[in-house]
Image (cartoon, grey):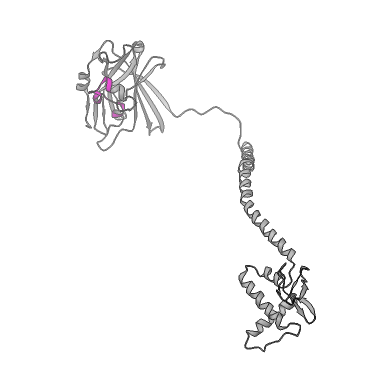
Amino acid sequence: MARQMITCESCGKRYDYLKSEACPNCGAFNYIKGAHQHICGAEDVERIIEMKSAEHDDSQEVVRPDTSIDRGLQQKYARARQRLDRLETTEDVFKSAFGGDFGTKKFSRKAKTNKSNAGCLKPLVIFIFIIVFFNLIAPLIFALISNTFESSNYEDYDVSYSEAPASEYETTYNSGVPGYTYTLNDLTFAMGGSAIVDTGDTLEPDYAVVAVKMDASCGLPSDEYATMNFTTYLTDSDYYTYYPAMDMTSYDNEELVNLLFPDSYYYFLQDFEIAYMDGQESVSGYIPYLVEKEYLDDLSYVIQFDYYDRENGSYESVCYTFPLSEGQTITTDEVIASYYNSAY
């Protein structure tokens, strides 16, 4: 079998030209031009492209290439174009088909691999940068801005000290007499005395429930309502000991209230019933207070009103202090009988 051994001008590898026109080592096409072996260069490729373009233009006369490009080269171009259709990049095809350096092609593939690895590392680098920025750089920037504003504030404002202005909130203290009627901002009230509620053996012996009788009515028109805050409590002369009214509606007191007054807690008067009265309404009943017996003799009953005085443009607080009755006891039936609320 005949063989024609030639040397590839691209990589220098010898191979049988009759068996394969392309170099089996680098893939370059070699052909024998006359008596000399030749590999397609860039000028040959350009002439081939011009020739193929002229073949598809009917309006122009076909320009034949010079005799340096023979029919064998055209067949090689056709096979190279078929390879081009199957591959992704034109550059690689022409390098392999028309004399590109094979070593350069291998290096290009490695570069692509490194580029893909760099693409994988890019998100990691960005993530690390964000962490460093928010943990180190951002706090420094904010601290610098804060210090700048603080220093400017110190320069803009006078740091000299002066006596604080007098408070607009005024408090008035009055001594009250049980059974006497008082009127304040269309609210009429009277403290009718006090007594200890008989709880039997239910309550511990160190404690007692003091009930204070209150009657109140609102003199405003029926379509208006009182705008004062009404609070009652028991306290000693030095205001050291303080006992607020028992809230019969609170979940915190539910167990104790059900233990002491399971069937009568609803009939005890509450502070909010007086504070939220509408015009022409009235209430009456006993307000309960849970106290320690050791302080009982020194306690007084205080009614505190807080409101806004429109005429003077100031907030007012008025307190009435009443003494407690001594030695009196009432039953829960008496508490029930004394309760009245015109709103219900």
| Residue 232 visible at all | yes
Task: Note whether 229 is above or below 33 in the view shown.
Answer: above
Whole-percent x, y for residue 98 in the image: 72, 73
Query: Splitting the image into 4 quarters, where does residue 242 fall?
Result: top left
**How many numbered marks, from 0 up?**
0
Query: Splitting the image into 4 quarters, where does residue 306 fall?
Result: top left
- Viewer-side residue, 68 vs 305: 68
Which residue is farthest right? 35
Q: Is residue 82 left or right of residue 7?
A: left
Which residue is farthest front? 1
**Residue at horizontal 75%, vertical 85%?**
67
On whether residue 266 falls in the magenta region, the answer is yes
Whole-percent x, y for residue 329 in the image: 24, 13
Whole-percent x, y for residue 88 in the image: 62, 67
On whether residue 170 falls in the magenta region, the answer is no
**Residue at horizontal 23%, vertical 15%?**
330
Query: Splitting the image into 4 quarters, where does residue 225 fall?
Result: top left
**Residue at horizontal 24%, vertical 23%?**
262
Task: Note whether 62 is above or below 95 in the view shown.
Answer: below
Q: Is residue 114 left or right of residue 292?
A: right
Q: Is residue 129 left or right of residue 43?
A: left
The N terminus, quarter of image:
bottom right
- Viewer-side residue, 213 vs 25: 25
First to last magenta residue range: 258-273
Whole-percent x, y for residue 107 in the image: 72, 61
| Residue 148 visible at all | no
The C terminus, quarter of image:
top left
